Image: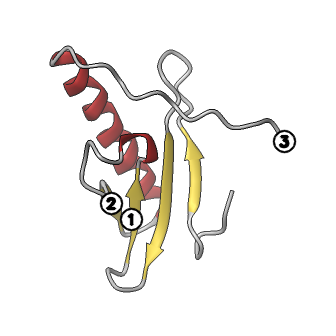
Amino acid sequence: MRTEEEGTEMTNTNTTGPHYTMLIEWSDEDQAFLVTLPEWVGQVNTPTTHGATNEEAASNGREALADLIAITQAHGQPLPAPRVHAGV
């Protein structure tokens, strides 16, 4: 996990569905924490959402991810494969 200044990479803690990665990075230009969902790049605009704080960005990212999953499933489209990280 990286520091707030460099960005934070988080994995979805949802235990019942796919585990997707959320990348949160500070933007001096935007003066906000920007959220990218790596598995969804190419399917949604990036950054996907943002927040004034790391916590707000993470909350907005979880909400955006839930919406993306619901919309994708409602359209009968396959969900992107979650990233697989080697254990530490």
> Residue 1, percent across and down?
69, 56
Q: Which residue is nearer to you in this view: 55 or 35?
A: 35
Q: Residue furthest right?
A: 88
Q: Report the Cα–Cα distance between label 3 and label 1.
A: 26 Å
- Asked which quadrant contains residue 32, the reply is bottom left
Spatial distance from mark 2 to mark 1, Cα to Cα?
6 Å
For the residues labelled 3 and 1, say whether their Cβ atoms are less than 8 Å apart: no
In which quarter of the view is residue 85 placed?
top right
The residue that label 1 is drawn on is 34
Q: Residues within 10 Å of mark 3 (few under 14, many from 20)?
A: few
Residue furthest to the front: 42
Up-down: is 12 above or below 53?
A: above
The residue drawn where x is 30% and y is 54% is 48
Do callouts 2 and 1 mark residues in contact (Cβ within 8 Å)? yes
Q: Position of residue 46 (x, y in %)?
A: 30, 58
Task: Name the spot of residue 34 as percent of width and height, x first.
Answer: 39, 65
* Residue indicated by mark 3: 88
Q: Amino acid at mark 2?
A: Pro
- Local packing at callout 1 (Cα closer than 10 Å; few below 14, some 14-19, many 20+) is many
* Front label number (2 vs 1): 2
Q: Earlier in the sequence, mark 3 or mark 2?
A: 2
Q: For residue 35, what is the image quadrant?
A: bottom left
Residue at 32 percent of width and 80 percent of height = 30
Q: Nearer the viewer, residue 42 or 88?
A: 42
Between discs 3 and 1, the one toward the N terminus: 1
Q: Secondary structure at mark 3?
A: loop
- In the rendered structure, which amino acid carries the disc numbered 1? Leu
* Above/below status of 5 relative to 83: below
Could you give the CA–CA distance between mark 3 and mark 2, rounded to whole angstroms? 28 Å
- The residue at which mark 2 appears reads as 47
Going by the picture, which residue comes out furthest to the bottom?
29
- Helix, strand or loop at label 1? It is strand
